[in-house]
Image (cartoon, rainbow, N blue to C red):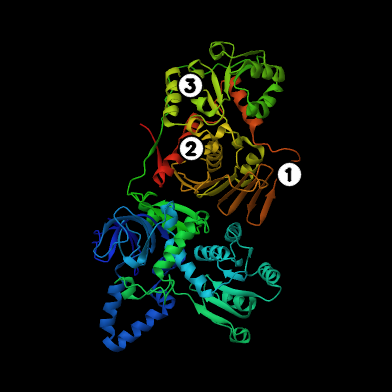
Amino acid sequence: MKQVVQNYKSGELALLDVPVPGCKPGGVLVRTGYSLISTGTELMKVSEAGMSMLGKARSRPDQVAKVVQSVATNGVPATYRKVMGKLDSYTPLGYSLCGVVEQVGAGVDDVKVGDLVACAGNEHALHAELNWVPKNLYAPVPDGLAPRDAAFGTVGSIAMQGVRQGESRLGEVALVIGLGLIGQLVAQLLTASGVRVVGADPDPARCELAERLGAAACGDPASPAVESAVAELTDGHGVDQVYLAAGAGSNQPVELAARLCRDRGRVVDIGKCRLDLPWNAYYEKELDVRFSRSYGPGRYDPEYELEGRDYPIGYVRWTERRNLACFLDLVARGRVDVGPLISHTAAFDDAVETYRRLEDGELKAVAVLFRYPEQADGAGASAAAPTVAVPAVRRGGRASAPVRSARTPVRLAFVGAGNYASSMLLPHLARRDGVELSTVVTTTALSAANAQRKFGFAGATTDLDAVLGDESVDAVFVVTRHSSHADLTRKALLAGKAVFVEKPLALTGEELTGVLAAVEESGNDRLQVGFNRRFAPLLRQAEQRFGPRTGPASLRYLVNAGRLDQGSWYLRQDTEGSRFAGEGGHFIDTASRLLGADPVSVYAVAASGNEDLQVVLGYPDGSTATIGYVTTGAAGFPKETLDLVADGKVLQLDDFVRTSVYDGRKRWVSSRLPKARDKGQSAELAAFVRAVRTGGPMPVPLESLVATTAATLAVRASLACGAPVPLAEAR
């Protein structure tokens, strides 16, 4: 099996082939699905390993003291050999993972083979394909909790132990200094406990993230914003607790804690930060300074951790394992949200490169996960994630569409004239020069007549074949219910028409394959799917302001879809597919446009009891896009908000009303549109008509339309297996 290791003497990181650990009594053998990189603790260790010997000594005075004692006891030569031997050996990395029980040791009766468990321990929950984990260092994963999220169990327990040490009470105010991974979790746990949280971190992106996840206010500790927020929330008394989750060498966190804490408040040290306590400040307020030791009671006790001897609950309510189980329960119930903390998910085979990018600062991250070759599914069974095939586009030998005279109108037929066609498409086309609305086809005569009267169609009919056989019709618009899109598109392509089909192109892989078979058979690839958002003027303008990227990007897209009225045909999932299958392609296409590529993997997690989804898309250059598709949000909140972060720049889109681009100290903000949101329908239709008129390329390459459709379909596959689904072109 493979395991991430490091040589502390040379600093070398490697993915090493090592023997599979045995399954000893009192524990279980776990096949890892996801393991979490602690971007604080682990990167500090990696950084120390790259230092000179003098630098290592300065960073670890505790170890230097042991060396000095060994010299006094054993002499210089023996001590030197001992120290060099220890330094020049591989040590493991990692301490938080989720995986599937592969083998159960004697004396274990609370889990069975195939169960999903979260594991802890820097000797047992390692970045390795298989780990032996003793009984008190794992906890079963609650039903419905995704393995990816359960991999946060250990760091969640660390944050939880810190909060317990602070003894927070309902209605209090707390200050969290340092909004890295642990600080973000501390802030969420406090918020879930009814405590108002002020955060302090020099990174504005981390401050924004903490506020988005529930913190009352956040800001740079060097700015007056934090002090102002504390004064306002506490009527000038100061916070009840301060949590030190920073890891820098500065003494600023300790001094800030003294300044903003109330009289007889509590200061809890969770991270490894400098602690030169200013005596007067701490004495005058009689501050209570406490330390939080890792995951909780039981840590560093070999009888508890290795021999499985639990502490009686009447004497020790919250042990390591109970903290781990409690945190998993909070995440499963939605009281803590770890999804937005995930900056990057890397294949385990890319572990060494991922550490390098983190250490060099090329990859800016709060939380990074390793995804292992064999994924753990949400039901607790060990299974490899299926690969969703992206059908290959094969074109026949048909000649290109002829170039038309600029004076000849493009003749369009519409199949379907419902609400969307009548409100968002036909008004743009009816007043466009060089376009003739030829025929409208509907299932009922009256709806066809209404569309003819309102938009000026030359003819109206219920006979689709008559329209497809009309050689004067240049292009067909398919704007019907979702279940009919693929079949109507296939027929129109075979009839030699250019086709504009509203999303989705297909609801199943078989339907998508059928459309492409029609392209191959006819040689007609003149197809456009109604992914209009990529054509929105504000988005195009912001793209230009943002400029080209040099490194991977992180994109967040929140879609506040809202609830549907009872009786809506969108709810007929047995025939029309899920809501996301119907419109999710919009958001995937927009993300792919901004990231300049098609996705290569899809991972989806569904909330319990509703249609809310979190969809994470992976891209070839390491970029990620997270689409939050929610139906339970407030009706007054904007429907679509988007953030793109890369190369020290941020692009924000506010519901197609305003865009902003931040670049260092510069900020560009678009002018606010006075009347209506422009989501790109007009520009998309103009591009389609122009392509039909000139015979030029369609507005979006067919390969991209197919990839977006396959990615949308892969969401269902990922939900079924509880794991990321690779997208691979069919051969």
Question: Can you tell which mark lies on residue 712?
Answer: 2
Amino acid at circle 3: Arg
> What is the x, y in percent for residue 79?
28, 81
Within 10 angstroms of label 3, few (less than 14), some, or many (20 or more) residues? many
C-alpha gap between disc 1 and disc 3: 41 Å
The answer to whether marks 1 and 3 mark residues whose Cβ atoms lie closer than 8 Å is no
Q: Can you say whether 668 is above or below 497 in the image?
A: below
The residue at the point 41 percent across, 66 percent down is 46
The answer to whether marks 3 and 2 mark residues whose Cβ atoms lie closer than 8 Å is no
For numbered disc 2, what is the local secondary structure? helix
Amino acid at circle 2: Thr
Q: Does label 2 or label 1 sit earlier along the sequence?
A: 1
Amino acid at circle 1: Arg
Q: Does label 1 or label 3 sit earlier along the sequence?
A: 3
Question: Can you tell which mark lies on residue 672?
Answer: 1
Look at mark 3 in the image and give the residue it sits on: 490
Regarding residue 556, the answer to whether it shows in the image is: yes
> What is the x, y in percent for residue 704?
49, 33
The residue at the point 42 percent across, 63 percent down is 325
Regarding residue 686, the answer to whether it shows in the image is: no
Q: Can you say whether 636 is above or below 65 in the image?
A: above
